[in-house]
Amino acid sequence: MDFAAVVHRHGEDTTQLAMFKLVSRIREILQFRTDSAVNGVLTISVEELREDALKVARELDEFPFDDVEKCAIIEKAWEIIGP
């Protein structure tokens, strides 16, 4: 499913609120990880990476999206954050 289909199915208001919360949470996690770098080197364990991924996914738990729709929204959020 693509992002446009999610917006069409759930409406712009719901999707926009979800995106706002999701992008904010991702930026918060990235800032925390960046701040923890030592001499420009970030060390992160697989477990920490899993925890961060779960934190991101949990941001969408209060919304009526199914798993496929959540993936589409998370992918779009990374497009917004990424270069």
Image (cartoon, rainbow, N blue to C red):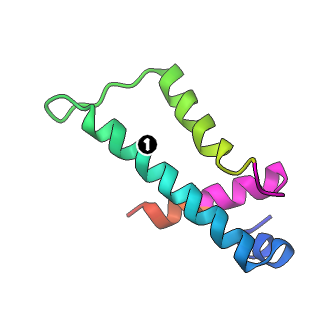
Q: Position of residue 17 (x, y in %)?
A: 64, 67
In this figure, what is the number of numbered marks? 1
Looking at the picture, does residue 41 appear above or below residue 5?
Answer: above
Report which quarter residue 33 is drawn in. Answer: top left
| Image location (x, y in percent) of residue 59 | 64, 48
Circle 1 packing at 10 Å, graded few (<14), some (14-19), many (20+), is some
Magenta segment main secondary structure: helix
Query: In the visual, does 25 lie left or right of 17?
Result: left
Q: Position of residue 53 (x, y in %)?
A: 58, 37
75 to the left or right of 13: left
Q: Residue 23 at what x, y percent from top left?
A: 52, 59
Query: What residue is at 29 percent from the left and 40 percent from the top?
Result: 34
Q: Magenta span has 67?
A: yes
Where, quadrant-wise, is the C terminus in this rendering? bottom left
Query: Residue drawn at (57%, 58%), measured in percent from left and top?
Result: 21
Query: What span is colored magenta in the figure?
Result: 62-75
Residue 78 falls within the magenta-colored stretch: no
Please say if 54 is above or below 12. Answer: above
Looking at the picture, tell me which residue is in the foreground, 37 or 17: 17
Asked whether 55 or 62 is in front, the reply is 62
Q: Quadrant of the N terminus?
A: bottom right
Tell me which residue sits at (26%, 38%) in the image.
35
**Vertical position of residue 16 compared to residue 82: above or below:** below
Which residue corresponds to mark 1? 29
Q: Amino acid at mark 1?
A: Ile
